[in-house]
Image (cartoon, rainbow, N blue to C red):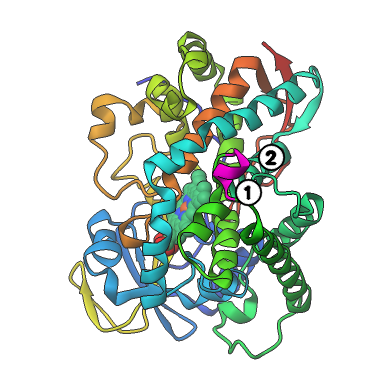
Amino acid sequence: MTLAFAPPKPPYANYSGVGKLKLSDYWTYFQAMQRNPLEVWGEHHFSIRLAPFRFLGRSNLLLNDPAAIHQCFVSDAGNFIMNPLRQAVLRPFLRDGLLTAEGDVWKTARKAVSPVFTPRKVNGFAPLIRDVCESAATRLVDKAGETISVSDLMVELTLDVLMETLFSGDEALDKARFTRGICDLLEISGLPHPFDLMHLPGWLPRIGQGKSRQVIRDLRDQVGAVAAARRAAPSPEAAGRTPDFLDLLLGAGLDDTAVIDNLLTFLAAGHETTARSLAWTLYLLSRDTKTRDRVEAEIDAAPLADTDPAAWSGLLPFTEAVLKESLRLYPPAPMLTRTSKAWSLVAGLPVPAGTDILVSTWLLHRQRDIWQQPDEFRPDRFLGEAAAAIPRDAYLPFGLGPRVCIGARFAMMEMVIVMACLSKRLRLDFAGERDPVPVMRITLQPDTGMPMTVQPR
Ligand code: HEM
């Protein structure tokens, strides 16, 4: 087997051992959590299947085993609720949106929101996404020879796509102010607060809380105003436009609060995840130009102009495999967490009520027993027989079970369209002094801006 490109990753933590944390290990852990939570993992975590351990008086279970993950997230999902730490980070902003709702509120919301994400509805967004991407490609071609931050570019492009698909670029929304608010919020709430890590009560004031409350209030007010204006406006059919997510949510019979919660949820869940994934994909291709040549050849040969962009992925299997491999190496949701409600047995291990279940897709996607050459960029593993041989639940970029990502189809479609529109017109050459290393801030961000030079094709 020939060598493939292996992008750099953060250093391993040096612990005395899982389950036997010494006092000094706590310090290592806390420092890593603040600097880069990917650095909490030691080398042994990449081959371990199950690791029960206690941390600050709480029982934890790290799962790196597909069958045990299936049990907690699918077959016995009712016993595993959303983890309090994750809720402390996300709920102040997303409230009872689909990502953070629990129990019957979640069940009702998922039922109401599902019709918004049927394949037909999602495919309906494809021409709109293509138009946004083609305009972005034209603007980029004008920057021929310039070096740009691909990280920032993808954040802007995916936000443009969401603004069009959520609100049809509604004039009632001040886009610049809204974008500023979203960026502020990402910066403020990218990490769990140390008080939350220590499970201190929510009423204890946290530094920065005042600013984030103000940003959240402002974003909610803005979305609320757009939703109220839309209720009074003519229907999309009467206005002669494609229904956007706001129309679909209003049509699903949700009240104003639920509409705001879910629109902000789609933004929070669908923006940065997709942006980071595209940026990592473009980085991988800029460092593995043979693979980039294959992507370009596939895109050049496909009859894209004559095909509905919703069907492009069927014409571009290798491009889609590249995206899947990028999602494996850099999962935008690098940690899935749950907490057990009642005592249970997981893979033969007794799990007390209140145990935090941790599934690090960063570890799982690089598990030594599951993946060959786990740290290398090898898109062919997602084609044909190799793809069929990937064990069930070993690859979870979009989660699994009842709470699997509702926007997965939308995200994959969007990413294929972005790759096709950009690759047809231009090439991005890596221009950094060193390769970026992923840093966990809810998603996986690059620790550099990913500078690349634009070369028209
Ligand atoms: C590459 C892009 C994306 C990735 C990697 C991703 C990943 C995920 C993952 C892993 C979950 C499950 C979380 C858990 O089990 O705790 C999730 C849930 C969710 N995602 Fe995505 N997502 C992406 C794009 C999107 C988009 C574009 C949207 C909406 C437009 C979206 C909306 C949601 C929602 C609403 C949930 C909560 C579902 C529920 O709990 O019922 N996501 N996503």
The disc, 2 or 1, on the residue closer to the chain's N-terminal end is 2
Neighbours of disc 1 within 10 Å: few (<14), some (14-19), many (20+):
many
Q: Tell me which residue sits at (57%, 50%) in the image.
A: 235
Query: Going by the image, does 181 lie left or right of 84?
Result: right
Q: Which residue is mark 2?
A: 151
Q: Position of residue 111 (x, y in %)?
A: 36, 63
Decide: marks 2, 1 in contact (CB < 8 A)?
yes
Residue range highlighted in magenta: 235-241
Residue 118 shown left or right of residue 213 in the figure: left
- The residue type indicated by label 1 comes to Gln
Q: Secondary structure at mark 1?
A: strand
Question: Residue at left 49%, top 16%?
Answer: 304
- Quarter assignment of residue 259: bottom right
Give left or right: position of 64 versus 184: left
Q: Which residue is mark 1?
A: 445
Res 10 seen here? no
Mark-to-mark CA distance, 2 and 1: 8 Å
Res 72 seen here: yes
Q: Is residue 118 above or below residue 249?
A: above
Mark 2: few/some/many CA within 10 Å (<14, 14-19, 20+): many
The image shows residue 170, relative to residue 314, as above or below, that is below
Q: Which corner quadrant holds the C terminus? A: top right
Secondary structure at badge 2 equals helix
Q: Nearer the viewer, residue 95 or 251?
A: 251
Provide residue 237's location: percent of width, then percent of height. 55, 43
Residue 238 included in the magenta stretch of the image: yes
x, y percent for residue 115: 39, 53
- Say if the magenta span includes residue 455: no
